[in-house]
Structure formats: C-alpha cells, structure tokens
Amino acid sequence: MAQQGLFLSQKQVQTMVLAPQLQQSLAMLQAPNLELKALVEQELEQNPILEEIPVEEARQEDKDTGADREAVDSLDPAEPPADLNFDPATEKESSEPVDDFQAEFDKLVQLDQEWRDHFAQSNVPTRQSAEDEEKRQFMFDSLVAETSLQEFLLEQVREAELPDQKRSIAEMIVGNIDERGYLATTVKELAYSTAVEPDRIQSVVELIQSFQPPGVACADLQECLKLQLERADRTDELEYAIVCDHFDALARRKFPEIVSGLGRDDVDVIDVQKAAERISHLEPHPGRAFLSENQQYIVPEVFVQKVSDEWLVTMNNDQIPHLRISNTYKDIMSSGNSTSDDREYIRDKIRAGKFLIKCLHQRQQTIFTIATEIVKRQNDFFVEGTSKLKPLTMVQVAEVVGVHETTVSRAVSGKYMETPHGVFEMKYFFTSGFKTAEGADVANTSIKDMIAELIKKENSHSPLSDDAIVKLLVAKGIKIARRTVAKYRGELNILPSNLRRVY
C-alpha cells in the first residue's frame, strides 16, 4: 500500500517576465491615441523632469525655429533619430549603468528638441484652435448625469404614495429588474426570500407593470409584448392573438402554421405576415432607452489622401502631447548646488523621460511605416473601394517593415485610418481570401459584400438559399463552400432563406 502524506519537493521552472520598460513600450504601442494621451499624462504626473508644452506656446516655438527647421525639413516626417530605431517585440532592457550624468542629461535635451522638431515639421496641421477648445469645453459643460431605469422606476414608486410595507416590496422588485427591463427573478422566489404572500408580491409586480416604460417588469419576451399591446388597447387586433397563442410559431416565422392555428376564414398568410411586421415594431427591451450608450469616439491615427496622383500618408499628432524638459530642473543642474541624492533622483527621472520620448517617437514611426505599406499593398482599395480589398497578412507587412508579427498586431490594434472611402480600423486591411479561376486574389470581405449584394437583389418571394449563392459565386470564378457562405451570411446578420421569405 502506497504511503500517503505531505512532502516537500523542488523543481526549476523557467518563466518569461517582461522588464518594466518593455512593458511600457508595448503598452504605448498598443494604446489608441486617446488612451496614449492618458498614459503620457500619467507619466507627466510621476516624472517632474518632463512637462507638456501648451498648444499656443508650441505653435509660437514652431514659428521661432523657422531657420533651424530647414535642416529638419529634409527628413521623413515619421523618421526618428537614429538611436530610436527598435522593435518592442524584440528589444531587451539595457543593464548598462549611466556613468556620465551630464552626458546623459545633454542627450535627453537633444532628444527633447528632436521630438519637438518632429512635430514642428509634420505635414498634418494642428486642428485644435482656440475656437475648437471652446466648443469642446461647451460640450463637456453640457453633459448631464443620466437617469437609470431603476432610478426612474423608484421615482414612480415614490409618486404612487404607497403604504410603507407595499413601498418596501416595490423597491425590492425594482432592485430585481435588470437593465433590459425584465424581472430577473420569480414571484415565488421573492415571496420565499421576504416571507410575504405570493399574491401580495404579484399585486405589486402588476402595479410596477403599469409604470413607464410599457412592458417593464415582465418575466419574458412574450409577456412583455403582450403587456405593451394591452397598454395600447390593442387586445382585439390580430397581433394580440398571435402573441398570446402562437408565439413559438411567430418566433420561427411559420406563418402558414399560424393561419392554420387561428382557424379564421378572414385571415391568410399575408395578413399574418403584416401582423408580424407590426409586432416587430414593439420594444423587446423596455429598458433600452435608459442604457448608457458608452459612445466611443473614433479619432483616426492615420490620414490617407491623394496628392498629385500619389497617396500621401500622414500621422495624426494632435492627440500626442508635446513634451520638453522642465526648466526648473535645468536650473537645478546648472546651479551646481544639488546634492548627491538630488542627482540620483534626477538621474532616474532622466532615464524614464528618455525612454518615454523614445517610445513615443518609435510608436509614431512604427504605425506610419505599417500604414504606408498597407496603402502600397491595398492600392486598388484606395482607388476603387471595399470591393477591391486584397488578402493581406500581418506576416507579409512585418517582413517588409522589419519588425515582428506581434509588433504589427499591437501597432494596428484599436487604430483607425481615415481614407477617401471612410474611416476603417487598420485591422480591416488584414484579411484572408480566395483565388478566382483566373488566379486573382479576392479578400473575404469582398466575398461578404458580394453575398450581401446578391441577397439584396434576390426575389423576396423566393429568396436565395446558401447553395444557390454558392453557384452564383462559382459562376463568378470564386470556388467557395456552402458552410463558408452560411458563416459569412451569419456574420452579416442575414437570416437564412426560409426566414427571409415574403408571402
């Protein structure tokens, strides 16, 4: 019999731990410009050596450095200083000590100037004028706190002036209504947890169901739609009979089955179909109006426009803070009165500041280079539109740019490009595809567009099946499986043919 007990043992395990600086560079590369601005602002709070140049002051500095800029104008707008060329996916943290403090300080000053020159000569004009800032501030000042569904219902409970016990039950019920507006528990469960008779709970539920919005506090979709029709005094209409007695068939759009079940001579399939259309105008989620939209404002990282028959790629530097070394610390260093502790503190902050500038500069350069390669490879898209998108992998771009595939993935994550055909996420341009019978490459997004167009033009009384769509695509020289068509149709949120049929 094997002996049982507790024993100690040792084993060696290798794990990869990213250095803090590498983590920072990867985070900054992956962050979209608005998130990047927040990261930089956090660094500015923690590093007193660095400070952000006010917009108007930065503009004035640009004017005052006209002569110095002539030497910079010959450089590529996104080309960083020579020592800033690195790939975050393969970079290793330097362990070399900084022996010459003054040399390190001078180097940071130089980087600071190069960073400002980089923005000064950028061919994308600054878009934040004083008028823009005033409009932006007005927008934020105009924002008001949103009322939640629960708050809206509790206000109606207070206005109902209920007895204390009934009000407490109502507040408990409201607390169990989810964000969609449905009662997330049962009357039986509420009665069990509160030791209150189910009939009393049910009466309060019905009271809340009389509140706004119509359909609130229901157990399921069928009850929700039924209540809305009752509140609208539409109980004599065909829709009410369908919702009450033939809801399952309605969900499956089995209109002939509903006609048969109704058993009415004055109702045919077309009448049922029209009633189903009217039912679709009811609100399946009564709490929808109170859901926080959490709007995400898209700010393009890259602009692509045609200039003199060539595609010009420019970076949006408006959201990237302009940084410089604080004059206060320059004065401290020049005074010679700093202690060894002060110098060590400043030394650490200089290292952090230098790397921050390095990361910012390299981020812009990496995104610019990748965007330029995308424009080069997807030229037909920029000329003719989405139907001409070609298959493209991140590996292909990484090989040309000279970085790791994961660097490309991080660089395009959450980034957007403004084109003559609209604003697209940069990941959009990386897609798999098919070869036509003639050997031409067609991206899967183009295939989806073709499927959507075929369905748009179909005979609604005899919609195209997935097999029929396959045959039409094969006739265009595109060999594709039926399951792939079904997959793409689903991704386009298009119903199968039996549910698209119009009688």
Image: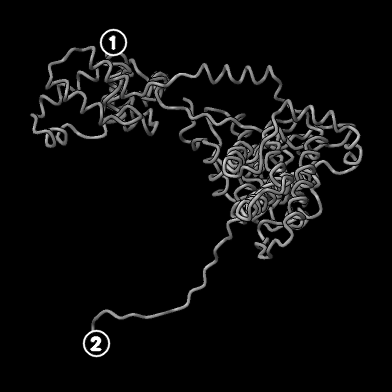
Q: How is the image coloured?
A: one colour
Quadrant in which residue 172 is drawn: top left
Say what secondary structure mark 2 lies in.
Answer: loop
Question: Residue at 75% of width from left, 38% of height from top?
Answer: 381
Residue 416's disc number: none
Q: Quadrant of residue 230?
A: top left
Left or right position of 200 against 355: left
Instruction: Tell me if mark 2 has few (under 14), some (14-19) or many (20+) residues whose alpha carbon lies within 10 angstroms of its own.
Output: few
Q: Nearer the viewer, residue 397 or 156?
A: 156
Above or below, 46 relative to 187: below
Helix, strand or loop at disc 1? loop
Left/right placement of residue 269 relative to residue 56 reads: left
Going by the numbered disc 1, the residue's amino acid type is Asp
Residue 222, how many percent across, how many down? 29, 28
> Looking at the picture, how far across and down is residue 126, in whole percent?
75, 28
- What is the CA distance from the residue labelled 1 to the residue labelled 2? 77 Å
Mark 2 belongs to which amino acid?
Ala
Q: Which residue is mark 1?
A: 233
Which is more toward the observer, 249 or 257?
249
**Foreground tag (1 vs 2):** 2
Which sits earlier in the primary sequence, circle 1 or circle 2? 2
Q: Is residue 476 above or below residue 25?
A: above
- Give the x, y percent position of residue 74: 91, 42
Q: Quadrant of the N terminus?
A: bottom left
Q: Nearer the viewer, residue 494 or 118?
A: 118
Residue positioned 27% across, 20% down in the render:
154
Q: Which residue is mark 2?
A: 2
